[in-house]
Image (tube, grey):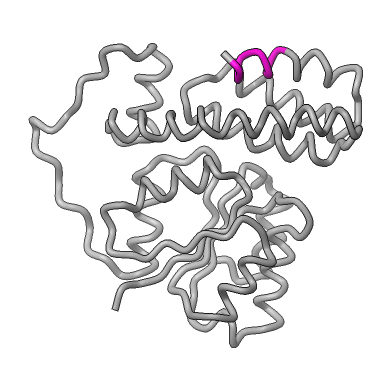
Amino acid sequence: MTARVLLVDDDASIRRFVALALEELEVELVEAANVPQAREQLAAGRFALVITDLMMPGETGLDLLQHLAEHPEQRGTARLAVFSAGLNAAMQARLASFDVWRQLGKPIALTELEQCVRDAIGAAPPVAATPAAAAALDGLSAAEQATVERHFAGDRALFLAYRASCVAQFANDLRQGDDAFARADAPALRRLAHSLKSVLLTLGQPEASERARQLEDAGARADWEAARPLWQALRAQLAS
């Protein structure tokens, strides 16, 4: 029977990255964009592994972990993994009380994510690639070449597929950011910036990622004076 993996993350770009990373594994990946969707999936079937983000609109990953602690029949034998850019020491200590099997930081190398799933389902290690398998990195910036090696195991085609999915998602990100400013919704702005911080770093754009980090901090403080120029600069880059 094919092992089932539940991925809970509100960011479509992150869900796409995970789906691309696991294409070669014999698993059924089920995606949930929020905690209510995850609860529905857990009530409907069993999983070998649950991978959840922490910061999401409405209920958070911690709420999902609490739900599973209170409803062990829905968890079954699933291993729990947290996949987040917010894994500081305090959060790591807090997660220990929820029987979290593995903590994965964002951004993550494809090989680390793949190995996590292999370990969870007891899959054999991957077959070593042949020496002639490396794809040319021509046409990529130095930062993009570095991220292909670091996060995509040297797979240029996988990186390009992920980049294309992110570019498609940026239009929605722009709408979310503009809407957050229009409604003065600091938590929404913070969540968007938190997500973009990891996505942009995975795409080999460290300066834009740092700008998103600063925007996340401004959103956490509801500092609109600091946030506005940061968003304008980030918005221009996403729209280009």
Image point (49%, 71%), residue name: 79
* In this picture, residue 143 sits left or right of residue 82: left
Q: Quadrant of residue 224?
A: top right
Q: Which residues are magenta?
A: 233-239
Name the image quarter holding residue 3: bottom left
What residue lies at 69% left-to-right and 48% top-to-bottom?
Answer: 89
- Residue 86 spot, x, y in % from top left: 67, 44
Q: Is residue 163 left or right of residue 136?
A: right
Question: x, y (%) of residue 31?
Answer: 51, 59
At x 27% / y 33%, what residue is drawn?
A: 155
Q: Is residue 63 magenta?
A: no
Q: Image quadrant for the C terminus?
A: top right
- Residue 51: where, in percent of width, then height? 53, 60
Residue 211, placed above or below residue 172: above
Is residue 158 toward the left or the right of residue 147 in the image?
Answer: left
Q: Position of residue 56 (x, y in %)?
A: 71, 51
Foreground pick, 222 / 180: 180
Residue drawn where x is 56% and y is 51% of the image: 83
Front-most of residues 164 and 93: 164
Whether residue 19 can be seen here: yes
Magenta span: chief secondary structure = helix
- Where's the N terminus, which quadrant? bottom left
Vertical order, 80 against 150 (above or below): below
